[in-house]
Amino acid sequence: MEPVFAIVPALIGLLVGAGLQYMLGRAAEIRRQLMQQRTQSYTDYFKAMAISAQTGRTKETLGAGADAKVRICIYGSDEVIRRLHVFETLGGAVNSPQTRNAVTELIQEMRKDAGMSRSKIDQGDFPPILFGPEKS
């Protein structure tokens, strides 16, 4: 009879371990999916902006931009949503120093949200990349 009593704690430990492994794996998968949705919505937003700037505001570009904005509102961090609000309140077009600054801050916040919080990139590094060299 004693061997049966020795097996029961081992089986309980095995079941608890398997349950914990499942739950932790599931939580990690949910976090991975959320991060993927966030980064994809951020990328799609800027892609729609770039296409709209090149081809003009069409039904397709406006729809793509609206879709990306809705997904940002669903999946984005609070601070990204605040920065997007600032940019959209300024007109949602990169046509002034103020809107360039708003876009730069939005991109920096998106990078933080995507896990790049330890980045040593300065805010001043983005404008030449995004908008070209400053004209004197």
Image: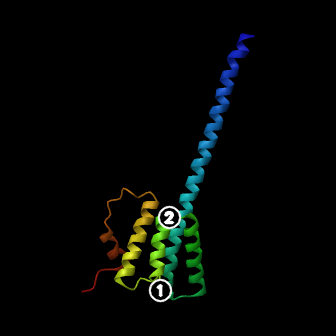
In this view, the residue in front, 43 or 106, is 106
Q: Is residue 33 above or below residue 42?
A: above
Q: Amino acid at mark 1?
A: Gln
Q: Quadrant of residue 107?
A: bottom left
Q: Residue at x 45, y 76 (%)?
A: 86
As helix, strand or loop, the secondary structure at mark 2 comes to helix
The N terminus lies in quadrant: top right
**What residue is disc 1 on?**
54
In this view, the residue in front, 112 or 57, is 112
Coloring applied to the structure = rainbow
Outermost residue, top side: 1
As helix, strand or loop, the secondary structure at mark 1 comes to helix
Near mark 1 (Cα within 10 A), the count class, few <14, some 14-19 or many ≥20, is: few
Label 1 or label 2, whichever comes before in sequence order: 1
Indicate which label's residue lies in the foreground, 1 or 2: 2
Near mark 2 (Cα within 10 A), the count class, few <14, some 14-19 or many ≥20, is: few
What number is the disc on residue 21?
A: none
Q: Residue at x 40, y 75 (%)?
A: 102
What number is the disc on residue 78?
A: 2
Q: Amino acid at mark 2?
A: Asp
Q: Residue at x 60, y 86 (%)?
A: 59
Q: How far, Cα to Cα, is label 1 from label 2?
A: 30 Å
